[in-house]
Amino acid sequence: MDSRDGREGPQLTAATSSFVLAAAVTVVFSTALAWAKDVSAPLKNFLKSLTGQDWTTHGLVDLLLFIGLGLIFMKTRASEGIPPRRLIGGLVVAVGMAGLGLALWFAFV
Amino acid sequence: MQILSSDVILLTHATFGVTGCLAALWVFVETLNAGLANRGRIRTAALLTAVAITAGGICGGFWYVHFYPVEKALILGGPWPLAHNLFMETKEHLFFVTATLAFLLPIATREEADSNAVARKLILAVSGLIVITGLTVEGAGAIVNHGVKVALLPAGDRVLHRASKGAPPWIRGTAAKVHN
């Protein structure tokens, strides 16, 4: 499962790069879901109906998405084509956008 | 002195959150000085980060679901409604970002930071982001707490508090006498 072979420079293992990509996608998805819940009462009520609290369902969905996407990316080797430095940069940008996006959303919307 | 279970849960939640941030900072510093000697410590601290952030989230989530609705009503009826509308809303969703990064950290530290520059950069990025987002969540929690406090203070006491803030003790004493 090591993606180092045949690549120039230091690389990440397939497992690590897959879960880094999964984390970036999960962070963006979680932020989008927070926005969607805030504008859509039916969506919020649906999430609430699953566990009794929309926040709890949101957290479980994020957890399952992170693990599920990580395993899928590992199996499909989807992250292999992405240079590791770009993968790390993508994660940092995703987290920055999520933080600013949430604060600005709840401040002004 | 009466300590309620909700107090214990709330303070345990904050304690685990700070512990998770400190453990992530530990990972960051160890990774700056990564070598064969501290490879084990980096992995231990990464695991501690994930466990502490998860425990903090479980305690915080339990308190949020069972005890927060009353405090939310107080905040929204008080002078600082933004303590809920902005800070709690941002905090409760930003936590998912911190938690995702905390789950990623033990996976990232499986890499050899001492001999792989990209792995070192990844671990520094993930642990650094946990510290930043985690402390932001902690700070927002303090503002939520203050939102409840100012909502519970009667208006007169708030004015007195503001008027005597930073004043010498004899002025604070006089202000208290006038108020009484």
Image (tube, rainbow, N blue to C red):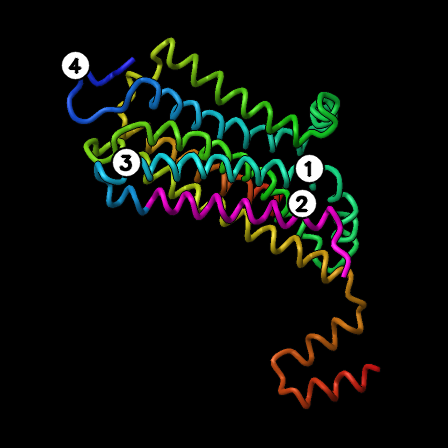
**Type of residue at label 2?**
Ile
Spatial CA span between label 3 and label 1: 35 Å
> Which span of residues is magenta-colored?
B1-28
Chain of the residue that carries numbered disc 2 in the rendered image: B
Residue B62: give its label: 1
Q: Which chain does tag 1 point to?
A: B
Residue bearing mark 4: A6
Query: Please, which chain is the residue tagged with disc 4 on?
Result: A
Tell me the SS state at disc 1: helix
- State which mark lies toward you, 4 or 1: 1
User: Which structural element holds mark 2?
Assistant: helix
- Per the image, label 4 sits on a secondary structure element best described as loop
Q: Earlier in the sequence, mark 3 or mark 2?
A: 2
Residue B140 x/y as whole percent: 58, 51
Q: Which mark is residue B9?
A: 2
Q: CA distance from mark 3 to mark 2?
A: 34 Å
Mark number for residue B39? 3
Check disc 1 and give the amino acid type: Phe
Q: Nearer the viewer, mark 3 or mark 1?
A: 3
The quarter holding residue B9 reads: top right
- Mark 2, Cα crowd under 10 Å, few <14 / some 14-19 / many 20+, is some
- The mark closer to the camera, 3 or 4, is 3
Which quadrant, please, contains the C terminus of chain B? bottom right
